[in-house]
Amino acid sequence: MAKRIEVSGLHAYYGGVHAIEDISMTIEPRSVTAFIGPSGCGKSTFLRTLNRMHEVIPGARVEGKVMLDDDDLYGPSVDPVAVRRTVGMVFQRPNPFPTMSIYDNVAAGLKLNGVRGKGKLDDVVEESLRGANLWNEVKDRLGRPGAGLSGGQQQRLCIARAIAVQPQVLLMDEPCSALDPISTLAIEDLIAKLKDQYTIVIVTHNMQQAARVSDRTAFFTIAGTGKPGKLIEIDDTSKIFTKPEQQATEDYITGRFG
Amino acid sequence: MTTETGLASQAETARHRAPTRAMSTGRAGDRIFAGAARGSGITVLAIIAAIGVFLVWKAIPALQANEAGFLTSQEWNPNANPPKFGIAQLAFGTVMSSLLAMLMATPVAVGIALFIAFYSPRRVASGLGYVVDLLAAVPSIVYGLWGLAVLAPHMEGISAGLNSALGWIPLFGGDSPGKNSIFTASVVLAIMILPIISSISREVFLQVPRAHVEASLALGATRWEMIRMSVLPYGRSGVIGASMLGLGRAMGETIAVAMVLTYVPGINLHLLEDGGATFAANIANSFAEATENGRGALIASGLVLFVITLLVNMAARAVVARRKEFT
Ligand SMILES: Nc1ncnc2c1ncn2[C@@H]1O[C@H](COP(=O)(O)OP(=O)(O)OP(=O)(O)O)[C@@H](O)[C@H]1O
Ligand SMILES: [Mg+2]
């Protein structure tokens, strides 16, 4: 199910603001790619160009090319809604649908895809919740509101919701930054498990986390306020954290740079 | 557990004590301001109470002289001797015309609000919002004139059409659909309460947190699906509250209804036929020529209207407040 992402010459803008500049990279399938870099360097912006969520912000636009295997995500006849069904996303703050039950949260994407029939839905809901390591904690209260779970559980619920539609790619924007260490560990275990099936991209400010979960790491930075963010390098995680090619990367990971 | 409660109550008392101490050492300005604020608050309450007492005072003799059931009679002859009057017809007309108005206005208002909030380009959105809000600024006498001169002639055909299509429903039945009916009044009322429902709904929709909106978009929802999954559940109680405020406003509307309706005595279930009366329109129409007793009767009916609108408004506020709790 997992697909390769190839980005070339990608720029993103917020109105007149040039947020990221000329990014090219390849993201391998069935692997975890981590994005690191200082705040404001455009990691979230870049991530959101990969499922066409960038353009839902008024005035925001994208230039360049993103290929998902052989499909051009920004091709003229491509429906962004279809892209988002293929490339799932998990946000920094858990955002389950507050009025929906746990069950309905997980089933929401399936229903959008026209899946009907209680038997089928039941199966996928259970499978997705198991996939998100949440089943045992919620199996007795599937009818209760999703908003009644703890933060860490809510985030795993959001992951279950995202994987229920069997996306090709899973994008995660700082999925653990609102969570305690134990919930963080639970999510990291989950990421390790999910990468057998999905292409995973994760933004994180936590170097240890990037080192622990990812196979490849991309380092972004920004030359100064008001300048667009840039990709400095992307390489195997072990290489980035031991002997990166670029001085800027080394400065950042050794803490000599903001 | 006990220690926790103990601590909590200690903190509680400390919190209570702090302002008291601050007050006792407070400067004269603070005390004057507090006194002025309390004074004006009390004045407002006193004025309201005085009005209430005055109205009840005026209403009581008329109610005592009344020879018909005040709550049950459909007759309205307070100037006769002996006086006979009841509010049944007024209540029926008021509730029916306002409910119909609310039912007609709410879907349109929600549609406008959704269009402004999610579909229209931003420049169109602010212009359109402005125009809708402007509808609220049109004086109700103008709506009355428009309803009488422009709308009513067209309503004749519409009412006849509805009557032949839906005549099997008692409310749309009857043999002589007309233009000065409760139905026509409710169309005028619907237009009058459209702005309030629409602008409150729009505000509610614009407050939907981005996180909810993006949650559904990221799952691959189209715009309409996003509205169904994220916006409407979040905004539902706000919209209900807004339409109930609209209902309250429609119930109290006087002059436009008075101009449109032709008074025919007695409750007529056939809303498309001429006739009907509401509390407010009845007061406006008959106050000038009323005798002492007639005025008392009108005041009594006004008090009933006041209680009904108060209840509707309180319910609306409770619904809106529950939404706050929930978000
Ligand atoms: N909605 C927006 N409108 C305008 N500018 C924005 C918007 N969102 C982000 N930006 C700008 O784009 C640039 C990149 O922001 P982005 O959120 O992608 O950074 P980030 O690397 O994810 O930062 P962080 O690590 O703090 O999350 C910043 O300069 C930011 O101010
Ligand atoms: Mg970010």
Image (tube, rainbow, N blue to C red):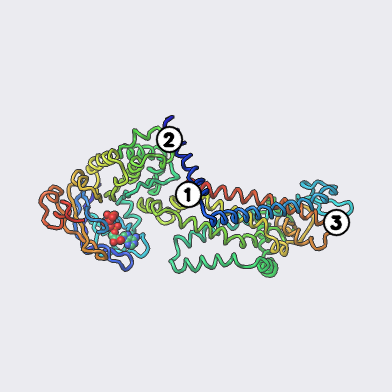
Q: Which residue is the site of mark 3?
A: B79
Residue A135 in the image: x percent, y percent?
Answer: 34, 35
Neighbours of disc 1 within 10 Å: few (<14), some (14-19), many (20+): some
Disc 3 residue lies near ligand 1 with CB under 8 A? no
Q: Are marks 3 and 1 on the same chain?
A: yes
Choose mark 2 or mark 1, whichever is in front: 2
Dot 2: chain letter:
B
Q: Nearer the viewer, residue A170 or A144?
A: A144
Closer to the eye: label 2 or 3: 2
Q: Nearer the viewer, mark 3 or mark 1?
A: 3
Residue pictured at 31% horizontal, 55% vertical: A83
Sequence order check, earlier mark of 3 and 1: 3
Q: Residues within 10 Å of mark 2 (few under 14, many from 20)?
A: few
Mark seen at residue B7: 2
**Residue A198 visible at all:** yes
Kind of element beneath mark 3: loop
Q: Amino acid at mark 1?
A: Pro
Q: Position of residue B218 (x, y in %)?
A: 35, 52
| Secondary element at tag 2 | helix
Residue B97 pos. (x, y %)? 67, 56
Alpha carbon separation for disc pair 3 and 1? 52 Å
Q: Secondary structure at mark 1?
A: helix
Instruction: Return the disc, 2 or 1, that comes first in the chain's sequence.
Output: 2
Residue B233 badge: 1
Circle 2: residue type: Leu
Residue A36's label in the rendered image is none
Residue in front for this viewpoint, A100 or A66: A100
